[in-house]
């Protein structure tokens, strides 16, 4: 799979070179108990996570706010290349069944750097400019950025 060109009207993106190997970042992304520790920007938590790492397999999380409000997300994996790329979408449910209200497709890439680190990239594709703007207004860069920092902090402890 070739990463589609970035479309500023439809996509949001967050990337960084991280001084940790791709295998370690892959592990914190693909182990449900580890993903639960960093997926939601604090003070939100992720009390539930389910994933089946195969195309069509479930990717489901529930984020919870301190007041008890819950934010479930459900979708499926589209593409998995171990230690290189994860692609998942809420546009399709497990088994590639169409979702009633699709919002985004995420492409997470882990590119090995010569120094042993990782060029990490999270690109989120939306069906239209309205959904892109909605996601931006929800705090995409701040929220996904804080989650990335939480992911890095957790990975450093492993």
Image (tube, helix red, strand yellow):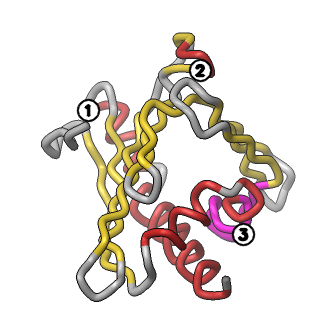
- Which image quadrant is residue 121 in? bottom left
Cα gap from disc 3 to disc 2, whole angstroms:
28 Å
The part of the chain drawn in magenta is 36-46
Check disc 1 and report its element: helix, strand or loop.
Answer: helix
Residue 12 — which label? none
For marks 3 and 2, give the one nearer the viewer: 2
Check disc 2 and report its element: helix, strand or loop.
Answer: strand
**Residue 91, above or below 44:** above
Could you tell me which residue is drawn at 72 percent across and 50 percent down?
Answer: 63
Tell me whether circle 3 and circle 2 mark residues in contact (CB < 8 Å). Answer: no
Q: Which residue is mark 2?
A: 93
Q: Is residue 58 left or right of residue 18?
A: right
Residue 43 — which label? 3
**Residue 27, above or below 19:** above
Measuring from the top left, give residue 61's x and y in whole percent: 70, 43
Q: Is residue 20 left or right of residue 153?
A: left
Q: Which residue is mark 1?
A: 129
**Residue 8, above or below 157:** above
Counting other residues with Cα less than 10 Å from the Cα at mark 2, is it few (<14), some (14-19), or many (20 or more)? many
Measuring from the top left, give residue 103's x and y in whole percent: 46, 29
Tell me whether circle 1 and circle 3 mark residues in contact (CB < 8 Å). Answer: no
Q: Nearer the viewer, residue 126 or 105?
A: 105
Could you tell me which residue is drawn at 42 percent across and 40 percent down?
Answer: 87
Quarter in which the C terminus is drawn: bottom right
Q: Is residue 37 left or right of residue 115?
A: right
Of the numbered discs 3 and 2, the one sitting upstream in the chain is: 3
Quarter in which the N terminus is drawn: top left
């Amino acid at each position: 799979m070739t990463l589609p060109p970035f479309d500023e009207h439809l996509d949001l993106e967050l990337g960084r070179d991280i001084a940790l190997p791709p295998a370690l970042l892959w592990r914190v992304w693909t182990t449900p108990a580890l993903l639960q520790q960093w997926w939601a920007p604090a003070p939100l938590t992720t009390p539930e996570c389910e994933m089946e790492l195969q195309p069509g397999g479930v990717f489901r999380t529930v984020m919870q706010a301190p007041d008890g409000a819950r934010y479930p997300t459900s979708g499926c994996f589209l593409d998995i290349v171990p230690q290189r790329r994860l692609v998942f979408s809420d546009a399709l449910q497990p088994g590639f069944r169409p979702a009633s209200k699709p919002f985004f497709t995420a492409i997470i890439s882990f590119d090995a750097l010569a120094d042993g680190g990782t060029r990490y990239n999270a690109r989120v594709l939306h069906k239209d400019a309205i959904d892109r703007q909605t996601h931006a207004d929800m705090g995409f860069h701040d929220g996904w950025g804080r989650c990335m920092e939480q992911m890095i902090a957790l990975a450093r402890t492993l």
